[in-house]
Image (cartoon, rainbow, N blue to C red):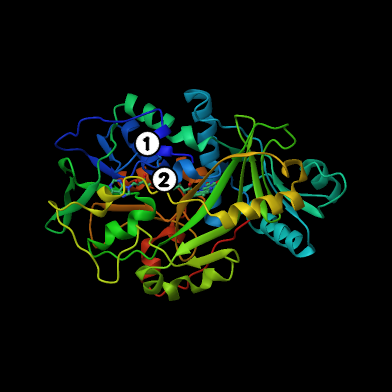
């Protein structure tokens, strides 16, 4: 079994300062990219990571860097993010593994083609994104299925891929060499306030005085915020992923082949996954049930399961203080088991839709807990009830690609600058001001 926290070759153990301009909770792609932007602007920044940098979602993902098929308000941020990935690739070397190799989605029905057309007309064109429809012939040529499996498709040549296992630690090394402080095995227990404003964070290794804190704690954000009396409706869903041994390169980019998704890897294999997700039912599943109802229709492959989700509060909420061992120290890296059901499905689906990989050896499998919001788009905002606290969480299974752009957005918010994007879709208050939950599209 693939053990991310043991295999990661880069470690981060900087001493903690007594104070910092900004403290960031969580060393995933969002926390690290926000910190890099802030440090480049001259701020002192500390990133506290309870386990390993990119030990959770930011290394376990599929590695797609896409604007294709996104919620309209995410697209301009995602397009800028892709450009930043390209710069990372040329400046930081092969650990980033970025390549503009394109993202495609292939269709078997007229309904899917109509959905692609709608998205191109209403979203891609608005932002001058180069997404285009593929004819039947083009789709089958691109998918390497001359026998004609596909009716057509949608393709964005400017989208890309990166290598999740090494990319964020590589960016984190760049952050460290620019002056950012990063400390692994350092859980933030609580945030202290004075006169209602953020005054410090208390970590398991001591206190850091600060007036600005970013919570980018991924699937743990709801649990962390609940201890402060802040309610964030977010639930974890588990996705299972596998990689193949190196094989002939028949498809260079990332693609949705009906019910199975593949992405070419730098090591010559493919990363394989499906939309099949599992959710361990806990107290929050009931607490947030009604908020999640609108998105359930689009989650046709979501299976609820009995089992313990470590990121959820129990029915009787637990509270902890500065001197208590927090839940974040009890599980350093959330490493859920991959699903046998999902893996069995991979073989069947590959045989049907990607025959080139039907018999290939799956050399590793893993799973990751995705931080899903009711409308499947993130929160990027400040918290009115706690001045100095900012949130960037709930990227709902597509935060890796947009991560460098989201990092810039959050640095602007924390810095009090206008990001230049319309961020109203990502405001925190949408969960409490009576707004209707409007799930974004999923390709
Ligand atoms: C299976 C899977 C496939 C995916 N595929 C894609 C894809 O192809 N493309 C794409 O764009 N996105 C994809 N995603 C989503 C993407 O990986 C995430 O949206 C993104 O990595 C989120 O980054 P993050 O920094 O917000 O969270 P994370 O990477 O989860 O980082 C949060 C960090 O916070 C730390 N933390 C939590 N609590 C505390 C605390 N109290 N103190 C200190 N540290 C704390 C955690 O240990 C964790 O390391 C996928 C996700 C999964 C799981």
Q: Position of residue 64 (x, y in %)?
A: 57, 43
Q: Which residue is mark 1?
A: 37
Q: Is residue 147 above or below residue 314?
A: above
**Gap between marks 1 and 2 measured at Cα:** 22 Å
Q: Secondary structure at mark 2?
A: loop
The response on whether ligand 1 sits within 8 Å of label 2 is yes
Q: Position of residue 215 (x, y in %)?
A: 31, 50
- The residue carrying pointer 1 sits among few (fewer than 14), some (14 to 19) or many (20 or more) residues within 10 Å by Cα, namely some
Q: Is residue 353 above or below residue 408?
A: below
Q: Which residue is found at the position 29% from the left and 71% from the top?
A: 315
Q: Which residue is found at the position 38% from the left and 68% from the top?
A: 282
Q: Secondary structure at mark 1?
A: helix
Mark 1 vs 2, N-terminal side? 1
Q: Which residue is mark 2?
A: 56
Q: Which residue is found at the position 77% from the left and 45% from the top?
A: 355
Q: Which mark is residue 12?
A: none
Image quarter (top left, top right, bottom left or bottom right) of the C terminus: bottom right
Q: Which residue is found at the position 15% from the left and 55% from the top?
A: 193
Q: Position of residue 222 (x, y in %)?
A: 33, 60
C-beta proximity under 8 Å, tags 1 and 2? no
Say if residue 89 shows up in the picture: yes
């Amino acid at each position: 079994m693939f053990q991310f926290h043991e295999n990661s070759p880069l470690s981060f153990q900087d001493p903690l300062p007594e104070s910092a301009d900004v403290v960031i909770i969580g060393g995933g792609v969002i926390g690290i990219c926000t910190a890099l932007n802030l440090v480049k602007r001259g701020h002192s920044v500390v990133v506290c990571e309870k386990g390993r940098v990119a030990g959770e979602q930011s290394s376990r993902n599929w590695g797609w860097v896409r604007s294709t098929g996104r919620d309209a308000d995410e697209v301009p941020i995602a397009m800028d993010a892709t450009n930043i990935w390209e710069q990372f690739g040329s400046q930081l070397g092969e650990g980033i593994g970025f390549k503009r190799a394109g993202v495609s989605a292939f269709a078997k029905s007229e309904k899917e083609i109509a959905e692609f057309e709608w998205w191109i007309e209403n979203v891609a064109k608005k932002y001058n994104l180069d997404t285009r429809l593929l004819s039947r012939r083009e789709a089958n040529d691109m998918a390497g299925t001359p026998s004609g499996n596909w009716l057509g498709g949608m393709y964005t040549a400017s989208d890309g891929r990166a290598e999740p296992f090494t990319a964020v630690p590589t960016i984190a090394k760049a952050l460290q060499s620019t002056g950012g402080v990063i400390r692994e095995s350092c859980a933030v227990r609580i945030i202290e306030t004075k006169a209602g404003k953020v005054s410090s964070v208390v970590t398991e290794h001591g206190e850091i005085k600060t007036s600005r804190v970013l919570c980018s704690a991924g699937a743990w954000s709801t649990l962390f915020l609940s201890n402060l009396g802040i309610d964030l409706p977010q639930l974890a869903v588990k996705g299972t992923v596998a990689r193949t041994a190196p094989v002939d390169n028949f498809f260079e980019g990332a693609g949705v082949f009906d019910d199975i998704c593949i992405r070419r890897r730098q090591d010559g294999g493919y990363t394989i996954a499906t939309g099949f997700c599992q959710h361990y039912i806990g107290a929050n599943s009931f607490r947030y049930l009604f908020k999640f109802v609108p998105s359930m229709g689009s989650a046709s492959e979501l299976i609820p399961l009995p089992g313990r989700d470590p990121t959820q509060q129990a029915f009787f909420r637990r509270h902890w203080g500065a001197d208590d061992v927090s839940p974040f120290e009890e599980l350093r890296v959330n490493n859920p088991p991959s699903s046998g059901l999902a893996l069995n499905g991979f073989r069947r689906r590959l045989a049907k839709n990607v025959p080139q990989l039907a018999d290939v050896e799956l050399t590793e499998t893993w799973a990751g807990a995705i931080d899903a919001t009711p409308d499947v788009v993130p929160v990027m905002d400040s918290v009115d009830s706690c001045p100095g606290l900012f949130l960037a969480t709930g990227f709902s299974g597509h935060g890796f690609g947009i991560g460098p752009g989201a990092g810039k957005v959050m640095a602007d918010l924390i810095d009090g600058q206008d990001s230049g994007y319309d961020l109203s879709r990502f405001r925190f208050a949408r969960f409490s001001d009576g707004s209707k939950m409007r799930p974004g599209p999923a390709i």
